Image (cartoon, rainbow, N blue to C red):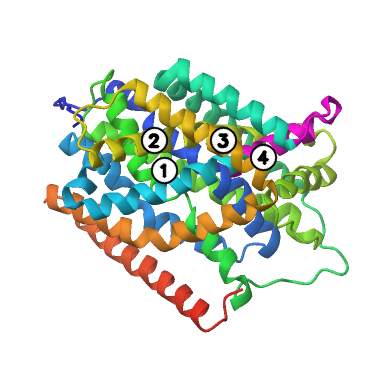
Amino acid sequence: MSQVTLSNQSTWASKLKAMGPGILMASAAVGGSHIVSSTQAGGSYGWSLLLLVILANVFKYPFFRFGAEYTADTGKTLVEGYAEKGKLYLWIFFILNVFSAMVNTAGVAILCSAIIASAFPMIGLSITQWSLILVAVIWAMLLFGGYKLLDGMAKWIMSALTIATVLAVIIAAIKHPEYSSDFVEKTPWQMAALPFIVSLLGWMPAPIEISAINSLWSAEKKKTVNFNTADALFDFNVGYIGTAILAVFFVALGALIQYPTGQAVEAASAKYISQFVGMYASVLGEWSRYLITFIAFLCIFGTVITVIDGYSRVNQESLRLLIRQKEDTRKSLNIWMTITAIIGIVIIKFFAGQVSTMLRFAMIGSFLTTPFFALLNYVLVTRENKNLPSWLKLLAIAGLIFLFGFAIFFIYALAIGKAG
């Protein structure tokens, strides 16, 4: 169990020192949900889904916050909390995370490699070859650099990403194109669009299991920096609110630039990256190709790093608790990172054509499991902390109603054959 010693007073110095896990969470979130789903939402439907994106971020806020709060208050990770509730919870969580780790690693690695291949076609490597190189490089970085390297890189990546994204939106708002003469407005408010909406919400702003990963990052940070609950919540809020704002900006990018052209949005993720960069360059000018490529690369690169590290940590911790091992070791984490990287590469090699489908399946699956893990997080935190603010409890209850209601509606639509 992760032991913590709470400091008595929170200061700006202690808040800044505590920053890291929340930024890592933001870095994990921006890849699949932001640059792909958020921008596709804006590119396909304009501003129609913006409110839904905002609501998803608002209603999921308590359950992600509970991860940081639970660890800071109790000294235990969320995974340890799941284990205390019963092994069934932990087995379900572990199985879902093993699947998510491999598929998500393959999916985001292909996205990142598509950007590199598009930027450097003269090298002549395929997306699969770039993916192998990318995963191997990141694996080596994590193996020899560890959490300290991950923590430092995430802060620089998110800072550069935020600046570049805001700049791109400002330019797009000033220079966005006129609507094409044959433009036909598309509406998402039809059953055929429901699978896309559900996949958008599933990873908005991130899969719910990131809350457990965030609690593990917090425990790791605690080994070198002493901070209290207020410091942990400051770090969390900066990361979560920041990534929620970035989601709005990415919807705006799609709505301002891609939507008015009326061009169909590529469904395949790797193809969409090429379309994403080319579309913006054609509207904003060829010079912007480098800016947009830079934004896209930062998004996905940060996500690949945090996905491999984060899922490996949570799978290591889950297995440790399932087999009742007393302490985790750096060696076992390295083994999990190696397994995650290797299986991710295997999926890329043999199932490259199906990765986008698998990724969409993972997003929808994440949405359907979100209500249950949200409820579990709520029960764990309210049991340990009897002094939660009333507004947070009310928001959590509203979030549970939203998440369970939407999931039930989607299952019903599938059952009667109306979804997709």
Does residue 245 belong to the magenta stretch?
Answer: no
Image x and y of residue 274, in percent: 77, 44
Residue 292 appears in the figure? no
Q: Nearer the viewer, residue 181 or 190?
A: 190
Magenta range is: 107-126
Which callout, 3 or 1, points at the residue further toward the start of the chain?
A: 3
Image x and y of residue 239, in percent: 42, 38
Horizontal side of residue 124 vs 296, given as left or right: right
Which callout, 2 or 4, points at the residue further toward the start of the chain?
A: 2
Q: What label does residue 349 carry, if any? A: 4
Q: Which residue is mark 1?
A: 240
Q: Residue at x 27, y 59 (%)?
A: 375
- Numbered disc in front, either 2 or 4: 4
Q: Nearer the viewer, residue 30 or 369?
A: 369
Do the numbered discs 4 and 1 sit on residues whose CB atoms are within 8 Å? no
Quarter occupied by the N terminus: top left
Q: Residue furthest bottom?
A: 416
Circle 3 residues within 10 Å: few <14, some 14–19, many ≥20? some
Q: What label does residue 162 carry, if any? A: 3
Q: Main secondary structure of the magenta part?
A: helix
Circle 2 residues within 10 Å: few <14, some 14–19, many ≥20? many
Q: What label does residue 22 carry, if any? A: 2
What residue type is disc 1 on? Tyr
Residue 8 appears in the figure? yes
How far apart marks 2 and 4 lie (CA) works out to: 33 Å
Q: Secondary structure at mark 2?
A: helix
Do the numbered discs 3 and 4 sit on residues whose CB atoms are within 8 Å? no
Q: Secondary structure at mark 1?
A: helix
